[in-house]
Structures are given as structure tokens and as C-alpha cells.
């Protein structure tokens, strides 16, 4: 048995299928203008995101110096606990 299918589909509303209206789904009524407040918030968020994460430059330099001198000690138990607390490994 062969089923013929059209090559293209037209917009059809569920109401038209039910027999109530013939207005297609793709017809757009009124569009709402962008809310100025949300545009400002998005702009602020983009600005903050572009600045990157806050950094403690003094701490970074201290750790770099300790690593270079061979004196930096990594507490693997504390690191593992922080990873568990933050769910870094994506557990349950």
C-alpha cells in the first residue's frame, strides 16, 4: 500500500483541525516590545560576565612563588573533600 504525502506542509492550527477556526498557528498576532528593564539587566549581566571571575592576585603570586621554590604542599584530603562538597565529579 502506497501513502501519498505532500511535499510541503502548511500551517494548521489545532482549532482548525477541530473545526472551530481557520486561523493558522504560524499567524502572529501582536508582538510585545522588549522590556527595557530586562534589556538593562541583560546588559549588566553581560558586562559582569565579560570581567571574568574575581581573582586574588596576591594569593596567586604567593602560590606561584611557593611552587617555584618547591615548598607548596597540596593537601589532597582537603582538596578531595572540597570536590565532594561542590559535587565536582557529578555524583548522585
Image (cartoon, rainbow, N blue to C red):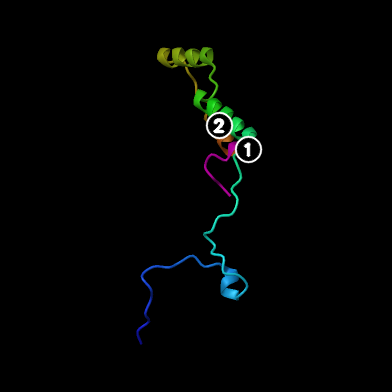
On residue 77, the disc is 2
- Of the numbered discs 1 and 2, the one sitting upstream in the chain is 1
Q: Quadrant location of residue 90? A: top right
Q: Is residue 90 magenta?
A: yes
Q: Secondary structure at mark 2?
A: helix
On residue 60, the disc is none
Say above or below: 39 vs 60. below
| Residue pictured at 57% horizontal, 40% vertical | 87
Residue 60 picture location, percent across and down: 49, 16
* Residue position marked by numbered label 1 in the rendering: 35
Say above or below: 50 vs 67. below
Q: Secondary structure at mark 1?
A: loop
Mark 1 in CB contact with mark 2 (< 8 angstroms): no
| Residue pictured at 60% horizontal, 41% vertical | 33
Say above or below: 25 vs 31. below
Q: Quadrant location of residue 17? A: bottom right
Q: CA distance from mark 1 to mark 2?
A: 49 Å
| Residue pictured at 53% horizontal, 19% vertical | 55
5 displayed left or right of 57: left
Residue 2 picture location, percent across and down: 35, 84
Magenta part mainly helix, strand or loop? Answer: loop
Residue 89 picture location, percent across and down: 52, 42
Nearest to the observer: residue 70 or residue 92 = 92
Q: Quadrant of the N terminus?
A: bottom left
Q: State which mark lies toward you, 1 or 2.
A: 1
Q: What are the residue bounds of the magenta stretch?
A: 85-92
Q: Is residue 10 magenta?
A: no
Residue 43 picture location, percent across and down: 56, 29
Circle 1 crowding by C-alpha within 10 Å: few under 14, some 14–19, many from 20: few
Amino acid at each position: 500500500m502506497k501513502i501519498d504525502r505532500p511535499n510541503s506542509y502548511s500551517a494548521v492550527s489545532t482549532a482548525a483541525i477541530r473545526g472551530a477556526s481557520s486561523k493558522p498557528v504560524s499567524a502572529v498576532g501582536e508582538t510585545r516590545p522588549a522590556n527595557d528593564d530586562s534589556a538593562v539587566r541583560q546588559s549588566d549581566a553581560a558586562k559582569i560576565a565579560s570581567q571574568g571571575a574575581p581573582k586574588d592576585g596576591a594569593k596567586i603570586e604567593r602560590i606561584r612563588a611557593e611552587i617555584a621554590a618547591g615548598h607548596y604542599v597540596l593537601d589532597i584530603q582537603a582538596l578531595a573533600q572540597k570536590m565532594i562538597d561542590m559535587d565536582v565529579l557529578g555524583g548522585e
